[in-house]
Amino acid sequence: MRSLRIQLTLFWALLLGACALVAVVLTVLYQSGSGAQVAAGRARVAQACGDIAARYAQSVPDVAADAPREDLLRVLLHVVLLEAPRVEGGVWSASGGMLGYAYPTYEGSGVKSDVPSAEEPLIVEMARQAGAGRQPLVNLVRGTHEVLIVAACPLAAHPDTAVWTMTRVHAGAIAAQDSLRAGIGILALLVVVSGAWLGWVLLRGLRQVGRLEEALAGAGGDTVPVLERTGIRELDRIVDGFNGFGARLQEARARLQEALAQQHRDMRLTSLGRMTASVAHEIRNPIAAMRLKVDNALAAPPGREAGALTAIGTQIDRLEGLVQSLLSLVQPLQLAPRAVDLPAWLQERLEAVRPAAEARGVRLALRGDAPPQAVFDPVHAARAVDNLLDNAVRHAPEGGEAVLSVQMDAARARCVLAVEDDGPGVPENLRAQLFEPFATGRTDGNGLGLALAREVALAHGGELRYAPREGGGARFILELPWRAS
């Protein structure tokens, strides 16, 4: 049960059940306490009044035209009311007034025989109505300190004559009843208010969580968004922790970039020593060839200088290309990333090497599903891919193929370019130094193409690696950090 919504709903249901249980307990306590006194008093006076009228009717069933028998009524009043604690009563007739009165359970020091004067008007009125209407009546009169309960029952044998009974109940019973209603009402209000409050808390929390989800989903690429505080303390702790993590991540990325740059510089310095001897060898050979041509031209008869100058120009071009490659290798690359139409850019790379491929009968192919756009430096990246394609065309056999493929690594946010051929592949003994300057297996190469391609990859924050091609051949994989424009 990990859903906050379900937990709050269950909490509200538990609160509802607790309030219902308290309401039941209050009702039971009321029914067993002072609140039941009013109901019990009402039942006592109604029962006593009915018993008196019923017993009188049983005693004199055939004297409907005669006057009421007062002696019998007084006896019945005393007998019946003796069994009804704190109940007094009497008989009233429209023609004779008050015919009898009894209060056998009176708790005073003597026998009470007088009708209460304060309540007599009410008693007479209720007896008159009961006698005239031939229906029993019960009335409650609430006072400051007590509740007066009066019942009146008609005598079936004598029209306009009625028996009345009366008792008093302490006013606390009514107060208890009112308190019960108020308590249950407060509980019901508490349930409604708590449900509304919990609903508001839940809605507010879910709205803020949804806003945070939108902010995270809307973050582009590998950027870490800065979340705004929600005003909810618990959520703000998470927001502050996330923002702090994002800041630390940015710092770690900056330190990583610095470390990569330092590694790049260290690699460049490490290879500088090994490169010095190779550079000297690459420069000494053209110079020696040019000196030989000059010496031969000076010793030869006039007219042979043109051939010597042509050979010298070729060696100078070779030296110039070597120097240009060296400068590109040792100078830091100044990248200018921009949005590139990737399918068109890849097609341009194939067209650049197509003449050389057609001269050797090598087929060119472009595979993969390239995205419409990517962001990188198209000039330097083109130099790297062109060098890889040129090597693939050179090493592919006649009638073979060179393939340029592209795919997106969404998990690592990288654009993966692969150049492969079906040639003999890279010898095992050369793979460890494959990307170092002047490491080459060709007699007509200087090994700077792969070194330059790797420099381009590192400058972009990517990498270049070699993997043997399945079925034979070479496969170079160039990975560049990618993001949609």
Image (tube, grey):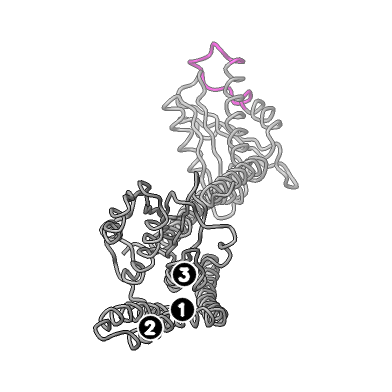
Q: Nearer the viewer, residue 54 or 455?
A: 455
Residue 237 seen anywhere in this rendered image of the structure: yes
Q: Residue furthest bottom?
A: 298
- Tell which tag, 3 or 1, sits nearer the viewer: 1
Does the CB distance between marks 1 and 2 fall below 8 Å? no
The segment highlighted magenta reads: 58-73
Q: Main secondary structure of the magenta part?
A: loop
> What residue is at 55 percent from the left and 70 percent from the top?
241
Q: Amino acid at mark 2?
A: Met
Provide the secondary structure element on which disc 3 rests.
loop
Please tell me whether mark 1 sits on a helix, a strand or a loop: helix
Q: Residue at x 68, y 30 (%)?
A: 78
Element under label 2? helix
Disc nearest the viewer among 1 and 2:
2
Give the quadrant of the C terminus: bottom left
Mark 1 nearby-residue class (10 Å; few <14, some 14–19, many ≥20): some
The residue under label 1 is 282
- The residue labelled by disc 2 is 290
Q: Which residue is mark 3?
A: 447
Separation of marks 1 and 2 at Cα, in angstroms: 13 Å
